[in-house]
Amino acid sequence: MSTLNEEAENIRQVALIHEFGYVILYGDKAVAWLGLPQNLEDKISELYDRGETIKQIAVTDQLGWVVLYGGNGYSAIDIPDTALDKLSELNSSNLGIDHISFTNNGGWVILYEKGAVWNSIPESAVSAIKDL
């Protein structure tokens, strides 16, 4: 096991993509990455150039992806339709979108300012979310 020095306190997210890729969000708006799909690299660069704060990046096992930014902004490519529909609904309702995670089989969880929504996740995870 490795540990990071205190400079790592500015890291906000580390996402690992397959066996070789990663994206790291750190500081207020900084991003470092390697081995991402080109369209995701392009989106990160576009958001950075616009001065957006990227909150989270999630990548599916099929290399679909979501970037959450600002209060409830998102950009997504090749994610399950049910997740895309829910992101659109939350965005249209002006609700803050905080986090999204994907399973290997097309399941997902979205955390937003008023709770959580999910589809096709393990029953144990549903129970744990409901218990919190």
Image (cartoon, rainbow, N blue to C red):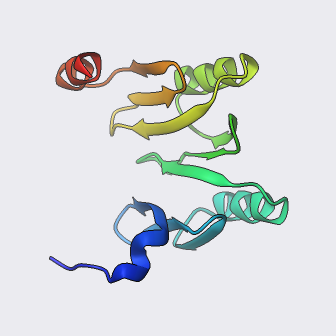
Q: In the figure, 72 relative to 47: above or below? A: above
On screen, residue 91 versus residue 5, left or right, reads right
Frontmost residue, 111 versus 33: 111
Q: Furthest residue to the right? A: 50
| Residue 111 point in image, percent of width and height | 47, 29
Residue pictured at 66% horizontal, 65% vertical = 29
In the picture, residue 81 is in which quadrant? top right
Quadrant where the image shows the N terminus: bottom left
Q: Residue at x 64, y 54 (%)?
A: 54
What residue lies at 41% left-to-right and 30% top-to-bottom? Answer: 108
Q: Quadrant of residue 93?
A: top right
- Residue occupying image coordinates x 69% and y 61%: 44
Is the C terminus in the top left, top right, bottom left or bottom right quadrant? top left
Q: Is residue 1 left or right of residue 96?
A: left
Task: Give coordinates of residue 114: x percent, y percent.
Answer: 52, 19
Can you give x and y, in whole percent of width and height, for residue 53 in the image?
69, 55
In the rendered structure, the answer to whether residue 128 lies left or right of residue 6 reads left
| Residue 107, percent from left and from top | 38, 28
State which quadrant residue 19 falls in: bottom left
Q: Is residue 44 left or right of residue 3?
A: right
Q: Is residue 95 above or below residue 71?
A: above
- Number of residue marks: 0
As rendered, which of 122 and 115 lies closer to the eye? 115
Q: Nearer the viewer, residue 48 or 34?
A: 48
